Image (tube, grey):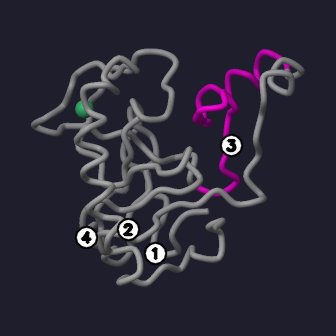
């Protein structure tokens, strides 16, 4: 489930849609949490689907560390990649946290290298630190910085409002 102060916006025909903050979201805020309405597809369940459904799954899901595909029932499936993402996953991606202040009107983004990206992605995020082509191999390089950003954000988790707290498991 996405943070309630977000909305879906069309960016352009090439990128499609994205998730944007409707209010400022402070560092340390949980921006997305896995909830019971999200669908989880293991390999067996995925293989039972026809070709067209599997294509949709590839496009709209992310893969957790158990190799399961997660299909967000809400607009979470439209979260785009950015090489300087403002939201990172935690704890086998049971939730994501704002690793810096997200301004009203800013797009919420995560780093696809951290969610078991299967195919290399040609990135057009526009960041000055854009890595160009996003692959899983980047994870080792970016992980120390990701960890530091998450650790810093995590210290604020009890200082900021958490509308998604209900969905966080202990
Ligand atoms: Zn990029």
What are the residue bounds of the magenta stretch? 50-75
Element type at mark 3? strand
- Residue ID for mark 3: 71
Q: Disc 3 vs disc 4: Cβ atoms closer than 8 Å?
A: no
19 on left or right of 122: right
Q: How many C-alpha atoms fall within 10 Å of the one at disc 1: few (<14), some, or many (≥20)?
A: some
Mark 2 and mark 4 residues within 8 Å of each other at the beta carbon = yes
Res. 121 image quadrant:
top left
Pick whichever of labels 3 and 2 is earlier in the sequence: 2
* Extreme residue toward the left, this view: 128
**Distance between the alpha carbons at the discs numbered 3 and 4:** 27 Å
Residue at which label 1 appears: 5
Instruction: Classify 132 as above or below 19.
Output: above
Which of the two labelled residues, at mark 3 and mark 4, occupies the earlier sequence position?
3
Image position, residue 57 (x, y; %):
68, 30
Query: Residue 103's mark?
Result: 4
Image quadrant assignment for residue 165: bottom right
Q: Is residue 48 left or right of residue 31?
A: right
When asked about the image quadrant of residue 140, the answer is top left
The residue where tag 2 is placed is: 21
Q: Which quarter of the rendering shows the N terminus?
A: bottom right
Residue at position x 78%, y 29% in the image: 42
Q: CA distance from mark 4 to mark 1?
A: 11 Å
Considering depth in this image, is 131 or 7 the residue closer to the camera? 131
Q: Is residue 3 left or right of residue 166?
A: left
Question: Is the CB atom of the residue marked by disc 3 within 8 angstroms of ligand 1's nearest atom?
Answer: no
């Amino acid at each position: 489930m996405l943070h309630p102060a977000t909305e879906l916006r069309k960016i352009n025909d090439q990128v499609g849609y994205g998730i944007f903050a409707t209010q400022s979201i402070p560092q340390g805020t949980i921006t997305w949490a896995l909830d019971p309405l999200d669908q989880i597809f293991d390999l067996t369940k995925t293989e039972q689907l026809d070709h067209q459904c599997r294509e949709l799954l590839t496009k709209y899901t992310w893969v957790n560390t158990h190799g399961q595909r997660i299909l967000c029932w809400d607009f979470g499936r439209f979260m785009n990649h950015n090489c300087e993402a403002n939201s990172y996953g935690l704890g086998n991606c049971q939730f994501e946290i704002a690793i810096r202040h997200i301004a009203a009107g800013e797009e919420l983004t995560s780093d696809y290298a951290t969610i078991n990206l299967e195919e290399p992605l040609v990135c057009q995020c526009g960041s000055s630190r854009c890595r160009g082509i996003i692959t899983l191999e980047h994870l080792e390089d970016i992980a120390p910085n990701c960890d530091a950003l998450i650790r810093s954000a995590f210290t604020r988790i009890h200082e900021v409002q958490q509308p998604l707290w209900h969905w966080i498991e202990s």
